[in-house]
Image (cartoon, helix red, strand yellow):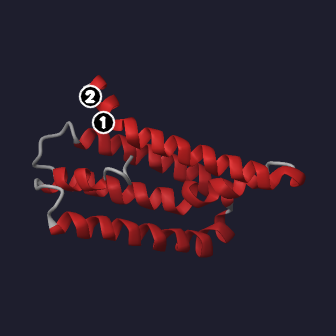
Amino acid sequence: VVNAYLDFILADAMDTDEQNISVKFGALGYGAMSFFVSLLGAVCFVPKYGRKTLLIASLLLVAVFMVLLGLSFEIPSTQTWLPIIAVVGYVSAVSIGVGPLAWAYATEVSPERIRGIVSGVAVSVFWLFNFLWTLFFTDLEDIFT
């Protein structure tokens, strides 16, 4: 959801609309940072700390930054730095661990003869739920608020 609604999160943090150029550059920076942090994790951190440690640490950090992002919408708008810190922390945590490493684990835990099928099903299910979550997020938000 952070990826799909990043423009709205940044616009809310900057107290502007989604078409503002600062919001667009923020989204561009988000993508670039995601790429470079993933690369850094793969090259530097996986060999040093191992996949399991990075995956667990990444999931814990994702939870912390999601709580911060949620709280940032409840705190008065003078704290505009909090959602930005939460998004930066979130993208770093996802990119360094759970984002790339979950795909490796999906294939490693399955028997070799069906790894291709398991990998294909995992990717399909991931994108199906990603699509559904993004499609119905605003409806769910209206229901719960």
Q: Residue at x 65, y 64 (%)?
A: 49
Tag of residue 142: 2
Q: Quadrant of the C terminus?
A: top left
Among the 4 quarters of the image, the one containing residue 76: top left
Q: Secondary structure at mark 1?
A: helix
* Residue 53 in view: no
Within-10-Å neighbours for mark 2: few <14, some 14–19, many 20+:
few
Asked whether 55 or 2 is in front, the reply is: 2
Q: Residue at x 17, y 50 (%)?
A: 12
Q: Is residue 140 above or below residue 54?
A: above
Q: How many numbered badges does the structure rendering display? A: 2
Q: Is residue 47 left or right of residue 90?
A: right
**Furthest residue toward right:** 113
Q: Residue at x 32, y 44 (%)?
A: 68
Q: Residue at x 38, y 54 (%)?
A: 3
Tag of residue 138: 1
CB within 8 Å, label 1 to label 2: yes
